[in-house]
């Protein structure tokens, strides 16, 4: 009786080994999966997932839809599609930038207008004297010609376009412009109105914003630098920022 009890006790004490072995096996599978996630090759990951599914008695491929990866820099099917979209968007941005530069060069303004690609999109930057007289928000006749030249290129893209007005840090205090805020905003608005008037531009794709003196390109420590900061930027926003812009809602009227 005593020996039998001892055998039963030993058997009960050894049961934890089964649980421990199962836990070790699951941990091994977990680390194999995590290791595979650290590799960029998605095809190998799918092969591993299918093998694990069969080994564990599954009838199909586990983790079929990878979704966003928990490992930085690793892409699943959804992220791969986004990457392809970003590449296509970058190529389109470059094509538009080149067309804008050609339009500007035909106007003989290569030295005073720049077209660069930033994270937010294409920035077509006009120095102040290209469009306005000092301290004024009235477009010059030459400015209207320039806007008419770039408008057809801007119309080719469905992207939102933001017109940004900038000034230097010299204060202004007139009846119309109590500060640089009003001057920069009025200039941006003047360009928006001209795009609509000249090219029948869709107003819902345009916006005007004034930054005053607070987004300088270079320090305002010389007249040459202040001249660079007095500018109007046309920003063609990337497609991925479309969702961040407020949409148009249907207008209802009360009877």
Image (tube, rainbow, N blue to C red):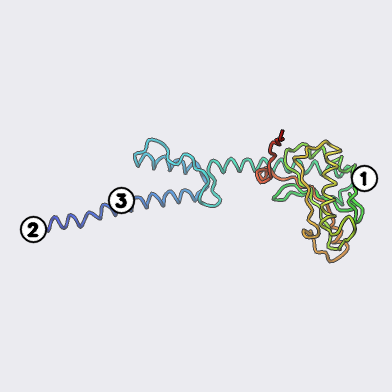
Mark 1 to mark 3 CA distance (whole Å): 80 Å
Q: Is residue 104 above or below residue 222?
A: above
Residue drawn where x is 55% and y is 41% of the image: 78
Q: Nearer the viewer, mark 2 or mark 1?
A: 1
Q: Are marks 2 and 1 in contact (CB under 8 Å)?
A: no
Camera-side residue of 63 and 105: 63
Kindly identify which residue carries mark 2.
3
From the viewer's side, name the closer residue of 18 and 208: 208
Residue found farthest to the right = 141
Q: Secondary structure at mark 1?
A: helix
For the residues bearing labels 1 and 3, Cβ distance under 8 angstroms:
no
What's the distance in space between the residues labelled 3 and 2, CA to CA? 30 Å
**Horizontal and vertical percent position of residue 220:** 83, 64
The mark closer to the camera, 1 or 3, is 1
In the image shown, does 94 or 244 lie closer to the viewer? 244
Instruction: Determine which residue is flagged by label 3.
Output: 22
The residue drawn where x is 11% and y is 57% is: 5
Quadrant of the image containing the N terminus = bottom left
- Mark 2, Cα crowd under 10 Å, few <14 / some 14-19 / many 20+, is few
Q: Of label 1 and label 3, which has the lower sequence position?
A: 3
Identify the residue shown where x is 78% and y is 56%.
211
Q: Which residue is mark 1?
A: 142
Q: Of marks 3 and 2, which one's residue comes earlier in the chain?
A: 2
Q: Residue furthest bottom?
A: 221
């Amino acid at each position: 009786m005593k020996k039998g009890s001892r055998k039963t006790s030993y058997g009960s004490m050894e049961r934890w080994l089964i649980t421990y072995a199962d836990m070790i096996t699951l941990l091994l599978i977990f680390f194999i999966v995590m290791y595979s996630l650290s590799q960029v090759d998605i095809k190998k990951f799918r092969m591993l997932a299918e093998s694990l599914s069969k080994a564990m008695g599954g009838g199909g491929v586990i983790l079929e839809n990878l979704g966003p990866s928990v490992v930085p820099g690793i892409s699943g099917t959804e992220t791969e599609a986004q990457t392809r979209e970003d590449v296509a968007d970058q190529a389109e941005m470059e094509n538009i930038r080149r067309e804008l530069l050609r339009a500007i060069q035909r106007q003989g303004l290569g030295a005073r207008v720049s077209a660069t690609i930033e994270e937010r999109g294409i920035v077509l930057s006009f120095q102040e004297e290209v469009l306005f007289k000092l301290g004024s928000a009235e477009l010059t006749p030459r400015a209207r010609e320039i806007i008419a030249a770039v408008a057809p290129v801007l119309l080719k893209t469905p992207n939102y376009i933001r017109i940004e007005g900038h000034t230097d840090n010299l204060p202004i205090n007139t009846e119309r412009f109590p500060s640089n805020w009003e001057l920069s905003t009025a200039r941006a608005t003047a360009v928006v109105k001209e795009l609509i008037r000249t090219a029948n531009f869709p107003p819902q794709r345009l916006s005007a914003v004034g930054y005053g003196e607070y987004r300088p390109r270079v320090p305002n420590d010389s007249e040459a630098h202040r001249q660079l900061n007095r500018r109007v930027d046309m920003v063609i926003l990337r497609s991925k920022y479309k969702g961040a812009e407020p949409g148009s809602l249907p207008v209802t009227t009360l009877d």
